[in-house]
Every structure is written in C-alpha cells, then in structure tokens.
Image (cartoon, rainbow, N blue to C red):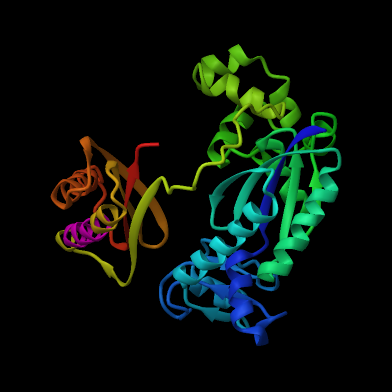
C-alpha cells in the first residue's frame, strides 16, 4: 500500500451547523456574523452557498451583505456551538480512522496520513462516516503531501473527493495565477507579477537563486518548491493547540478620540490576558489591530521580553504596539491578539 495524505474540510461549516439547529433554513441564504443584526457594524463570519451566490463571503461588512442579499437570514456567532460540533467531527475521524495519523488544523479541517491502495474509496468512506455521525458534509482532497491535498480540496468542493498528485499538478494548476497556491497571498502574487511571473508554471520555471536575490534567501527558493507541489512537512498526530488568542470589538460609533482608543485597547488586552491565564499558557508577542473608517485595517506587534501571562505585561505590550500607529484617524474596530510559542 502507498502512503497518502487526505485533507478533510467541512463544507460551509458554521452555516451548516446553524442549519442543523434551524432545519427550516435549509436551502435559504444564511449569513453568520456579529450579533446577527445586519444594520450594525460587523463582518460576515461565514455564508451558506446560497448566500455566496450573491457575492456574500467571509470578512464582508454585514451592511454590505444585506444589500447584496436582502432576503438572507442573519444569525449571531455562537462559538461554543461550533467548537462542540468540531469536537464531534474530530472524534469521529480519530475513532473511525484508527490506523490514520490525524492532524487537526482548525474547527473545520484536518489532515490524515494513511496507507491505502484506493485513496478515493477511503475519501468517500470518510464522507459517509461524517455524514452519518454528525449530519455534516465534507470535501476530501487527496495528495502525496499536505500541500497537494489542501489544494485538491478546493477542486472537490462541495461534497466531493479530488486527487492532485505530482503527475497531474501542472495539468490542473500550471495556468492558474500564483495566488492559487496555498501560502501565496495577493501581495506576493503582485510582486511576482511585477517580475513577469504570472502563473504557477511561470513560478516553477523561475531560477530559485534569482528569486532569492529579490525576495530573500529562504522565501525565494521556497516559492519555487511550492510551485512544483513539493512539501515535506509531516502530518503530526498531536492534539490541536491554538497558536494565538484574540479579542476584538466593532464599535457602532466611530472612535475619534485616541485617548478612548487607548482605553479600549487596554481593556481588550486585559480580557485576552485573562483568556491566556485560563489556558495556562504564556504569550510571547502581542499584536494590535486597528480598522480605520471606512474599512482599512492595519496591525502592529510588540514582542515580550519574556513569555508571560501577566495582565499588566500584556496590557503594556498592547499599548506599546498601539504607539506604533502614527495615523490618528477615526476607528471602527480594535483587536488585540497574543501569540504563543509554537
């Protein structure tokens, strides 16, 4: 038997959980975000496929979402419910696939390393097991490594199974833009395009040393490896541990006074510090997010001298990060995130 990596990704996970709670919403456009009131400021956490057809997607302002899809049902975020559903999903994967190494990477996705001669059949089996035990649909991506499996999932959605391997890599991805690759965002894709590197095939054909001189000795060659579909990161079967904790608030009126902004950041830092202490973990870095009016977002961070979960130290680090913001424009959202050592 051959070793395969499978990526299991729950379809429209949060919206699907809400539909299970409210069966009358099945087939209707459902949007989850904020406190469920689209007349207030806030952003979309997730949208059902029916809502996505109207251009509603994660991160979209709720007020924009209701303009695009006025007939949508808007619901508040219920983190506890989603965590409970996620735990049930992951328990099913570990229980039914006892021979697999299972790496949980979030509420709604996990990698499995398995030995099998028929990965497609196993993918369909996993889909059936999850549907039977949780009533949730998933997509399974198959590859020789985590990168290939992750990208394969996108081609299998919704509720499908798709295989992407060394043999089919360029057939499937060669003509696609570089940001189709897992790990390349819009900014990097734009820089690559400025060098005449527009597609995955272009990037794979680029001299790694050339990119090393332009983008850095590590990033440049790594991007070329990415474009070839090469990934040697293992599937690790250890319990999922969050790499950060965060708190944020969207304000229904603009914060024009930066003394008030400073007070709000201090309060958010105190709340997230309490979360860190309850987790019995220590922070190594604190990041502050500021979303200005109308909707531009910037972040700055401050590294702690020593790992800590002390409230005062985390609050001071958050305020130090806030001091790095030189623009004193009106603010609509503030967030504080603490990062843990990996």
- Using the rendered image of the protein, determine whether residue 148 is visible from the camera's viewpoint: yes
Q: Which residue lies furthest to the bottom in this view?
A: 24
Decide if residue 231 is on the left or right side of residue 279: right
Q: What stretch is highlighted in magenta?
A: 261-272
Q: Main secondary structure of the magenta part?
A: helix
- The picture places residue 84, in percent across and down from the top left corner, at 51, 67
Please tell me whether residue 189 is drawn above or below residue 204 in the rendered image.
below
The residue that appears at 17% across and 63% down in the rendered structure is 260
Identify which residue, 272 or 110, lies in the foreground: 110
Q: How many marks do you count on the picture?
A: 0
Decide if residue 201 is on the left or right side of residue 313: right
Image quarter of the C terminus: top left
- The picture places residue 36, in percent across and down from the top left corner, at 47, 79
* Picture quadrant of residue 1: top right
The residue that appears at 84% across and 47% down in the rendered structure is 120
Please tell me whether residue 314 is drawn above or below residue 195 in the rendered image.
below
Identify which residue, 224 or 234, lies in the foreground: 234
- The picture places residue 107, in percent across and down from the top left corner, at 54, 57
The residue that appears at 58% across and 64% down in the rendered structure is 88
Please tell me whether residue 334 is drawn above or below residue 309 in the rendered image.
below
Would you say residue 239 sits in the magenta stretch? no
- Using the rendered image of the protein, determine whether residue 44 is visible from the camera's viewpoint: no
Would you say residue 268 sits in the magenta stretch? yes
């Amino acid at each position: 038997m051959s070793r395969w990596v499978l990526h299991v990704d729950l379809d429209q996970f949060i919206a699907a959980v809400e539909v299970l709670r409210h069966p009358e919403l099945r087939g209707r456009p459902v949007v989850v975000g904020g406190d469920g009131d689209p007349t207030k400021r806030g952003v979309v956490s997730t949208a059902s496929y029916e809502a996505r057809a109207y251009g509603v997607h994660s991160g979209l302002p709720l007020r924009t979402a209701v303009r695009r899809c006025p007939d949508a049902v808007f619901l508040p975020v219920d983190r506890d419910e989603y965590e409970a559903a996620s735990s049930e999903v992951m328990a099913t994967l570990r229980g039914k696939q006892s021979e697999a190494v299972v790496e949980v990477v979030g509420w709604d996705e996990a990698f499995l390393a398995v030995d099998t001669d028929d990965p497609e059949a196993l993918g369909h089996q996993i889909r059936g097991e999850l549907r039977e035990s949780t009533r949730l649909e998933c997509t399974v991506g198959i590859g020789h490594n985590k990168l290939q499996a992750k990208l394969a999932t996108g081609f299998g959605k919704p509720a499908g199974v798709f295989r992407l391997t060394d043999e089919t890599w360029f057939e499937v991805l060669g003509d696609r833009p570089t940001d189709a690759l897992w790990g390349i965002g819009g900014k990097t894709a734009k820089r690559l395009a400025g060098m005449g590197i527009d597609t995955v095939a272009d990037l794979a054909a680029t001299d790694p040393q050339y990119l090393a001189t332009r983008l850095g000795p590590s990033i440049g060659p790594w991007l070329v490896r990415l474009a070839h579909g090469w990934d040697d990161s293992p599937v690790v079967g250890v319990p999922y541990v969050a790499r950060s904790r965060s708190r944020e608030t969207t304000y229904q009126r603009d914060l024009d006074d930066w003394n008030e902004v400073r007070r709000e950041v201090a309060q958010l830092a105190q709340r997230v510090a309490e979360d860190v202490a309850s987790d019995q973990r220590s922070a190594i870095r604190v990041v502050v997010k500021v979303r200005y009016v109308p909707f531009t977002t910037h972040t700055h961070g401050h590294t702690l001298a020593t790992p800590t979960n002390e409230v005062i130290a985390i609050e001071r680090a958050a305020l130090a990060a806030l001091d790095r913001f030189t623009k004193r424009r009106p603010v609509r959202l503030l967030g504080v995130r603490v990062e843990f050592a990996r």
